[in-house]
Image (cartoon, helix red, strand yellow):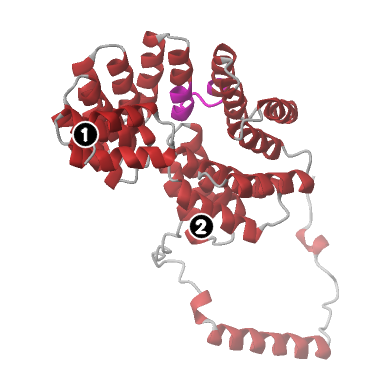
Amino acid sequence: MYLDPNRWRPHVKRRRSPVLLIMLSVLAVGLIYIASKQSHLIRNPFATPTPSPTPTRSAATVMTNAEAFYRSGQFNKAIAAYQKVIDLEPKNVIAYTWLARLMVFSGNTKEAVQVAQKAVELAPNNADVVSTFAMTLDWNGQYDDAMNNALQAINIDNNSAFAHAYLAEIYADEGNVPRAREEVQQAINLDDKSPLIWRNYGYVLEKAGQYQKAIAAYQEALKLLPNFAYVYMAMGRNELALQHVDSAIDAFQHARAINPQAPQSYDAIGWTYVLNDNYQRGIAELRKAMKIDPKYVLAYKHLGAAYYMHRNYEGAIPVFEQAVRLGSQSEEVYYELGLSYIYLQKCDQGIPWLRKALEINPRSQPALAGMKLCPRK
């Protein structure tokens, strides 16, 4: 079929309206003016485009990385990432809250209190935030303030699993185990998918002396967070309480494998060996803990005790004294240090330490016995 091209052409050429022509002219002039002022918007299609500068990673990206580090058990890296989030977004309440929680498990309780307090200042009516502040206070030994904040969190939101879990921990630390069990059970009922809450559940059972059940609760935490080094340490404590020495050391070694730069696992392994008559191996592990962290006071206390138990009083004295310089105010450190001097016939140097032990506990039997070994002047 032949189509005549002229068929699709209008027979009469329509004239444009003069008003329309004027409007188009004005529009064209306007576009030319705009282009002259914003010439950078006009691109030469044949020119190689200049690459735009690489944007700084957003806080959201860093937050995702922080969560990934937490899930993999790399708490130190997670802490650094959450601190970076706060640098990018100084009012990020979630970052402050998680940073405080992880700082506690890393042993930095004083700074954790400050971080958690900042979170409360930003979100004073958030139960999870307020209860996290209570947790940091509890771990820092500020039990009354911890209790007040935990109860406040419950008042804000009675359905906050974290609020009940942290309140349970505080009750356990104050010796009210029945109340602690009620609270932690409510926390599990509200959220049985949090490894932190299962950790608290195990801790309450541990304080109740139910070590096997505590281990089972810790295992539930590890199902949710397999590289939770702190929970492995807790399992080791409970295995020791059950006199399962090999299982305890195995748990401590798991913790060390996850975080080989933490002194706690070396100290725990060393002290377990010492208590089970593997003296030289225990000493070696304790020294590793001190090398990793020269300010880790518990390793000094345990090493001093190891020397003391094996009558190496000359070795025990400088180690105990370093523990004291690092802040130890332990009754046992004081009387073992004092007795070490006395057994070396140095009563003048030993008596002051025994008196310090008696200031803590006037009925301290080792200190009282040591006082009788020295003639009165």
Q: Amino acid at mark 2?
A: Ile
Which circle's residue, 2 or 1, is located before the other in the chain? 2
Secondary structure of the residue carrying tag 2 is: helix
Q: Which image quadrant: the N terminus?
A: top right
Q: Is residue 272 left or right of residue 145?
A: left
CA gap between label 2 and label 1 equals 62 Å
Residue at image location 51% in from the left, 47% down from the top: 99
Measuring from the top left, give residue 308's x and y in whole percent: 23, 25
Tell me the quarter of the picture where residue 246 sits: top left
CB atoms of marks 2 and 1 within 8 Å: no
Q: Residues within 10 Å of mark 2 (few under 14, many from 20)?
A: some
Q: Is residue 177 above or below residue 338?
A: above
Q: What residue is disc 1 on?
A: 375
Measuring from the top left, give residue 96's x and y in whole percent: 55, 52
Q: What residue is disc 2 on?
A: 86
Q: Amino acid at mark 1?
A: Pro
Measuring from the top left, give residue 260's x and y in whole percent: 31, 30
